[in-house]
Image: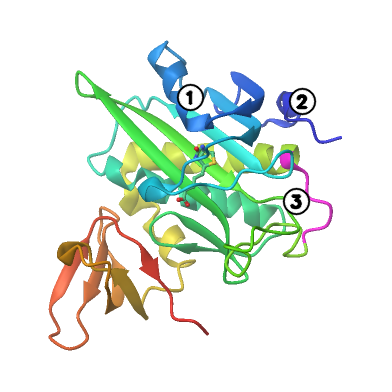
């Protein structure tokens, strides 16, 4: 039985998931969590759905959300004290989720800024949305993790994967969610208290693109073209430091799409 309504039996967290709404179908768990946050949802309130009719990815993309096979989850976060680098929250979420998935038996890498990869393919993604009221942040952290999906839409079948396709035996959505919420809570408490620098090595050690040539969307030119850079490392605030391989010029990138060379 893999019923997310039974999540509370497996939870080990103090706050994350202790208030939980599960829906058969939602437009987007992030939309529902944002509405719930505006109604006063507490820190850790969790929204899950078996199916999303318009799951959202970064940069306005669609997140394919077939029914019953994967995790679609959004958590409301109300940190007591937000670090100045709260813009790195999605990276901190990546660290927490990666460590949980590793504990579930998957060997997961991070791709800056928000992707979880397994076997070189996308296993999951993170969508962080932040609203400020009187200087106090309210975050909605949405994540999708492909758990039991065995076949993907032809448009993404070469780039997507799932826990079952990566050899995790009979993965359960409920057990996976309980595990990643535990590691996520532990990681976020360090991030909120001490900032991204305190967990940066837990990101960089598992981010193989650092030190390599990658391509970036050339956002500045608005041309849809890509440019090649060397991804040198992360700054203390989680931004990506890149170097132009021809001019040697260094630049800090806050957010864009990164394309890895095909092996
Ligand atoms: C990305 O890789 O672009 C981010 C994908 C985030 C998808 C999740 S699924 C649960 C939550 N609800 C949404 O509409 N999006 C996020």
Can you say which quadrant of the picture contains the N terminus?
Answer: top right
Residue count near mark 1 (Cα–Cα under 10 Å), binned few <14, some 14–19, many ≥20: many
Residue 112, how many percent across, how many down? Answer: 39, 61
In this view, the mark in front (1 or 2): 1
Q: Is mark 2 within 8 Å of ligand 1?
A: no
Q: Are marks 1 and 2 in contact (CB under 8 Å)?
A: no
Q: Is residue 237 left or right of residue 10?
A: left
Q: Quadrant of residue 211?
A: bottom left
Find the magenta span and give its range.
168-173
Can you tell which mark lies on residue 148? Answer: 3
Residue 161, how many percent across, how many down? Answer: 65, 62
Judged from the image, the secondary structure of the residue bearing numbered disc 1 is helix
- Spatial CA span between label 3 and label 2: 18 Å
Judged from the image, the secondary structure of the residue bearing numbered disc 3 is loop
Which residue is labeled 1 in the image? 33
N-terminal-most mark, 1 or 2: 2
N-terminal-most mark, 3 or 1: 1
Residue found at the very far right of the displayed protein: 1
Can you tell which mark lies on residue 211? Answer: none
Residue 70, how many percent across, how many down? Answer: 68, 44
Residue count near mark 3 (Cα–Cα under 10 Å), binned few <14, some 14–19, many ≥20: many
Q: Nearer the viewer, residue 105 or 41?
A: 41
Which residue is labeled 2 in the image? 6
Decide: is 129 above or below 5.
Answer: below
Secondary structure character of the magenta stretch overall: loop
Residue 13 in sight in this render: no
């Amino acid at each position: 039985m893999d019923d997310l309504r039974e999540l509370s039996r497996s939870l080990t967290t103090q706050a994350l998931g202790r208030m939980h709404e599960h829906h058969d179908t939602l437009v987007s768990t992030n939309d529902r969590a944002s509405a719930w946050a505006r109604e006063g949802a507490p820190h850790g309130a969790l929204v899950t759905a078996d199916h999303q009719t318009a799951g959202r990815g970064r940069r306005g993309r669609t997140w394919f959300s077939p029914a019953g096979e994967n995790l679609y989850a959004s958590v409301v976060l109300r940190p007591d004290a937000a670090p100045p680098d709260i813009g790195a929250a999605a990276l901190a979420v990546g660290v927490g989720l990666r460590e949980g998935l590793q504990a579930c038996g998957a060997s997961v890498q991070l791709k800056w800024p928000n992707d979880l990869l397994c076997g070189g393919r996308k296993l999951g993604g993170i969508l962080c949305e932040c609203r400020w009221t009187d200087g106090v942040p309210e975050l909605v952290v949405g994540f999708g993790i492909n758990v039991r999906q065995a076949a993907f839409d032809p448009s993404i079948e070469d780039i997507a994967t799932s826990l079952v396709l990566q050899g995790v035996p009979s993965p359960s959505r409920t057990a996976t969610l309980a595990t990643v919420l535990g590691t996520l809570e532990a990681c976020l408490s360090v991030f909120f208290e001490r900032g991204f620098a305190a967990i940066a090595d837990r990101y960089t050690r598992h981010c193989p693109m650092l030190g390599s040539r990658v391509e970036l969307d050339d956002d500045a030119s608005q041309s849809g073209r890509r440019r090649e850079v060397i991804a040198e490392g992360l700054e203390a605030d989680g931004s990506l430091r890149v170097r132009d391989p021809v001019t040697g010029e260094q630049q800090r990138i806050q957010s864009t799409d990164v394309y890895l060379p095909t092996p």
